Image (tube, rainbow, N blue to C red):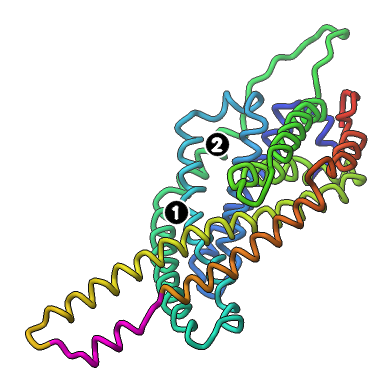
């Protein structure tokens, strides 16, 4: 990012930043069709998240360029990338768990992975079709709107316009307070909503800071800590989502098995050997074992968050953030 970014007008700086993220999404887009490019979806999704975060943070500076319809279309595309990536993350965690399961439970893991692989395949095909239809036109529209803006020129030498740096300082202050608030509300590992909101706040704060590191090199360790917080809260969120998924999968497996047993039982001449064999197959028991492993992961992750960030332990971080970025009372970062 241009070292003089902070000195530019707020409207110009915000647009330059948004266009850089749009460029990243446009660069990742054609890679989505390459089945060997395992990072394409991740890179495209991150670029869209950064772009949306920028548009949200600098809304006062960008509102005259972006209609509600364009924001809504961008939101819908970003949300469409979620299911496939979330399922991929679940598969990545589940596959190695086979070594922690009893032999009798590994068939349950194979059953679950087959369901998730099929879900991910369908989600990715649907996503590619949707992006092919919508992203090129939306990208062109956003680029056209973001490259032009109207402004006022003050000829009075005493008149002083705010800079992008000053506008960013105010946004950083607000985002920092939001993160502090959500962290303070987390009491235990069951506080899924507040932990998720804290992760989003940490991500937004990090996205605001990262493009400014050329001007604020002292913020690099803070960005690193925010990335670590975002990662651990992200894994905690994944554990919460997987627990719900395991519960639903167990209910489905139980229902399917009950239906099959019923069908076998009402045959004109039920085969008792087949019935006994079917009764002995319990996918649910393996899913319960996976649930216990996932719950242990959840508790370990929460303990890490608690030790590093909760119950006042984040005060030093927020103090350093204020000193480095000017949140402690200075006008500019």
Q: Position of residue 186 (x, y in %)?
A: 68, 42
Q: Is residue 285 above or below residue 174?
A: below
Left or right of residue 171: residue 92 = left
- Residue segment shown in magenta: 270-283
Q: Residue 131 got which mark?
A: 1
Q: Is residue 314 above or below residue 111?
A: above
Left or right of residue 205: residue 160 = right
Q: Residue 216 got which mark?
A: none
Q: Is residue 296 above or below residue 172?
A: below
- Which residue corresponds to mark 2? 144
Q: Position of residue 305 (x, y in %)?
A: 75, 52
Q: Position of residue 19 (x, y in %)?
A: 65, 42
Q: Is residue 100 above or below residue 271?
A: above
Left or right of residue 304: residue 75 = left
Q: Secondary structure at mark 1?
A: helix
Residue drawn at (44%, 83%) of the image: 107
Residue drawn at (17%, 77%) of the image: 263
| Residue 96, quarter of picture | bottom right
Q: Secondary structure at mark 2?
A: helix
């Amino acid at each position: 990012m241009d070292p003089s970014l902070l000195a530019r007008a707020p409207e110009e700086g915000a647009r330059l930043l948004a266009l850089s993220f749009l460029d990243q999404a446009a660069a990742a887009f054609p890679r989505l069709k390459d089945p060997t490019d395992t990072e394409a979806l991740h890179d495209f999704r991150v670029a869209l998240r950064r772009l949306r975060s920028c548009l949200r943070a600098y809304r006062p500076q960008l509102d005259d360029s972006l209609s509600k319809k364009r924001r809504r279309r961008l939101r819908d595309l970003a949300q469409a990338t979620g299911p496939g990536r979330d399922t991929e993350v679940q598969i990545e965690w589940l596959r190695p768990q086979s070594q922690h399961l009893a032999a009798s439970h590994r068939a349950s893991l194979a059953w679950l992975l087959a369901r998730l692989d099929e879900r991910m395949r369908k989600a990715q095909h649907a996503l590619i079709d949707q992006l092919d239809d919508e992203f090129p036109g939306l990208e062109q529209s956003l680029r056209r709107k973001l490259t032009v803006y109207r402004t006022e020129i003050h000829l009075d030498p005493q008149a002083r316009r705010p800079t992008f740096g000053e506008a960013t300082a105010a946004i950083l202050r607000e985002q920092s307070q939001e993160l502090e608030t959500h962290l303070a509300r987390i009491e235990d590992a069951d506080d899924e909503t507040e932990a998720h909101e804290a992760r989003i706040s940490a991500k937004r704060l990090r996205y605001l800071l990262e493009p400014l590191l050329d001007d604020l090199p002292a913020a690099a360790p803070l960005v690193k800590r925010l990335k670590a917080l975002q990662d651990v809260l992200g894994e905690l969120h994944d554990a919460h989502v997987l627990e719900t998924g395991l519960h639903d999968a167990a209910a489905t497996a139980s229902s399917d098995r009950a239906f099959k047993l019923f069908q076998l039982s009402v045959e004109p001449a039920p085969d008792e050997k087949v019935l006994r064999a079917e009764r002995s197959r319990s996918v649910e028991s393996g899913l319960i074992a996976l649930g216990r492993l996932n719950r242990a992961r959840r508790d370990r992750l929460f303990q890490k968050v608690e030790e590093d960030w909760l119950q006042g332990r984040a005060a030093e971080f927020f103090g350093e953030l204020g000193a480095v970025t000017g949140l402690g009372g200075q006008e500019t970062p």
